[in-house]
Amino acid sequence: MAKRTVDVLVPVALDKAYSYRVPEGVELAPGDLVSVPLGATDYTGVVWAEGTARPGLDNRLKDIEEKLDIPPLKGELRSFVDWVSNYTLASRGMVLRMTLRMGAHLPPERERIGVRLSGPPPARMTPARARVIRLMGDGVLRSKAEAAQEAGVSAGVIDGLIDEETLETVVLPPAPVAGEPDPDFAQPDFTSAQEQAAAALRESVRGGGFSATLIDGVTGSGKTEVYYEAVAENLRRGEQTLILMPEIALTAQALDRFYARFGVPPAEWHSQLSPRKRARTWAGVAAGEVKVVIGARSALFLPYADLGLIIVDEEHDPAYKQEDGAHYHARDMAVVRGSLAQIPIVLASATPSVETEVNARRGRYRRLHLPERFGGQHLPAIEAIDLKREGPARGRFIAPRLAEAVKIALERGEQALLFLNRRGYAPLTLCRACGFRLHCPNCDAWLVDHRFRRRLVCHHCGYSLPPPAECPKCQAKDSFAAVGPGVERLGEEVAELFPGRRLLVLSSDLVESVERLRQELDDVAEGKFDIIIGTQLVAKGHHFPKLNLVGIVDADLGLGNGDPRASERTFQLLHQVMGRAGREAGQGHGLIQTHQPDHPVMRALISGDRAAFYDAEIAARERDGYPPFGRLASLIVSGGDKHAAESFARKLAMAAPREEAVRVLGPAEAPLAVVRGRYRFRLLAKSPRAFDLSGYLRDWLTAAPKPKGNLKLEVDIDPQSFL
């Protein structure tokens, strides 16, 4: 009789599950985690389905090595892996890999040793020993370090009492990853609009089933506190909650606010976790012990034991798009997981994505509107500074009107924020003698001057070098000049304009660690800096009580790159930056330096007419068939040899199936033509919304030639970047 077989999916770049024989006496079901041999390596895989009988081939199959003592992956998560793989064209193995980040190969965790009273007092009593015995008399089990610290003694005193058998050692259970949040720990004081929105969310959670709700609230309207009411209701039901955040930097204040509302911090999930913390969090989520996770996009793939609610904060943020490996958009996939699991999902934003706005207008998502700031604060008054008429002096970047506004804010004891979405000191360095520009040898990009680090850096591949003493082309000495501003150069100008003022430059390349960034953001919130200069790092969700003035130094930066989403992204980013002003006391004020004061984005920001901007943007997308009214897929061919890459891209285009509903554009050299020494050519497939573009691409790639040697093909469904 043939042995029973099962199909096992392994977390490698393969799309198919492999059949394995089940050893005698081993009970297996779909979702169980097993150890299996594949090639010369053992992998942790997941039983995906029952195997099919293969007469004559069973003896050639390998046996499953063991069933692992790990909670099985639920059917909902396995369906989600299949769905994401099918939609994005990423292999199922690579999608599964995102769910199995449990640290299986870590060494055993070091035991935690506790102490407690167990015997008579020692023969020789000292004041220090007496303090320890009095402390331990409460019967509480403490670690050795905790006992020494609380009693105010050295570790040697504790060891001495153990030797005397007054204290005994006990192995402590591992400390929990996160405490048990209390849904009634702190009751919020809501406005009428907030209470209505909170009641609607509580009802969604109580009602169960899939629903999608948009909390559409102006900056500072208390969206977080409102969706915490959905979290509280879900906790009362005993179910788990996932709160997605676009950036790790955002989680600092989010953790503090969660603690204030629920009495304990939530579990975190992001790339900066230590391997041990990651493994313990994964296990806690899978066992149902962790009730709330605040995490980056990858937290969407955790194996929740009983997921009951998903929240996507700042749902419009581009950081939700994964740009390497499996190309997925975490917001969209969160909606898919909510639908598969039949649970509610909440999206929150002051500037919803066009896709979400259209879904709300058409009734697919329920909209909960918060039109006013919490505490009755007014939205900032915004004005434009037309750089064509009242620009700064030559070699300067802050216009006189903006400088005067900063001076007035500082005299009032308030903070000012100057925003420039450009890292480093200057975006371009050229020779004054011959015009030679320093560029990256690996990428089609100029080297960016980072004066604080004394390096010229490529922002695409990381190549860097110290500033050369002479021009490589004409050998002129000390001839290089910085062209254009970055935040570091802006900081230099601000220090000259406002000497003695406390200045902080916030930029991702200046962040030494997540902890340091969190400390700096806390320092800003506590008023320890007068002027903050920052990139988009400062735009997202931060609350700075003393900040009443925001100046946008170059509002036109994101508008000229040919991206179909350029206007939307610029509007969202600048609106979010402006929203940092006037959130607690006084009147917020915003100044926008622009060469295009009549651009629709600038007009919408200045007038506060958000609806007019969305009306125009949605109409343009619908007219041109761009998302959400059409679908796009990007195919990027890259290789070390330009001619080989271009030739393969042309063959790929010629293999595209004839389909009236699909337009295939290209191949064309990508706007960023060389990255990390690889030449890049782009094809773009465009179809109506209802068309199965993923299926079309699958058929296309099946029939097309396969990349060989150094060539590589990346497929991105619903691309967010067009570089």
Image (cartoon, helix red, strand yellow):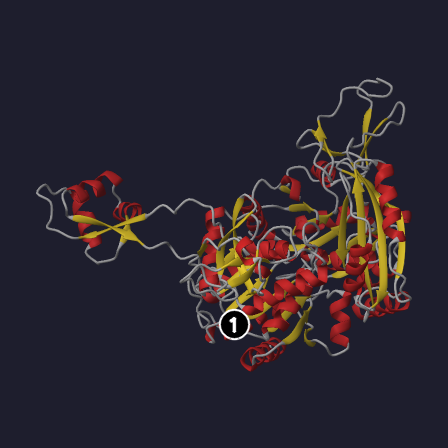
Classify 239 as above or below 148: below
Classify 424 as above or below 165: above
Say few, some or many: other residues with alpha carbon within 10 Å of mark 1 (under 14 / 14 to 19 / 20 or more).
Answer: few
Which quadrant of the structure image shows residue 178?
bottom left
Indicate left or right for 401 with 528 as reference: right
Nearer to us in this view, 98 or 263: 98
Q: Residue at 79% of width from left, 20% of height from top?
A: 478
Disc tally is 1
Nearer to us in this view, 15 or 447: 15
Residue 519, position as x, y percentages in the image: 54, 47
Classify 238 as above or below 442: below
Q: Secondary structure at mark 1?
A: loop
- Amino acid beneath label 1: Pro
Residue 611, position as x, y percentages in the image: 80, 70
Residue 371, position as x, y percentages in the image: 69, 73
Classify 525 as above or below 162: below
Indicate left or right for 562 with 341 as reference: right
Label 1 sits on residue: 188
Which quadrant of the structure image shows residue 429?
top right
Residue 691, position as x, y percentages in the image: 82, 69
Furthest toward the left, the residue is 123
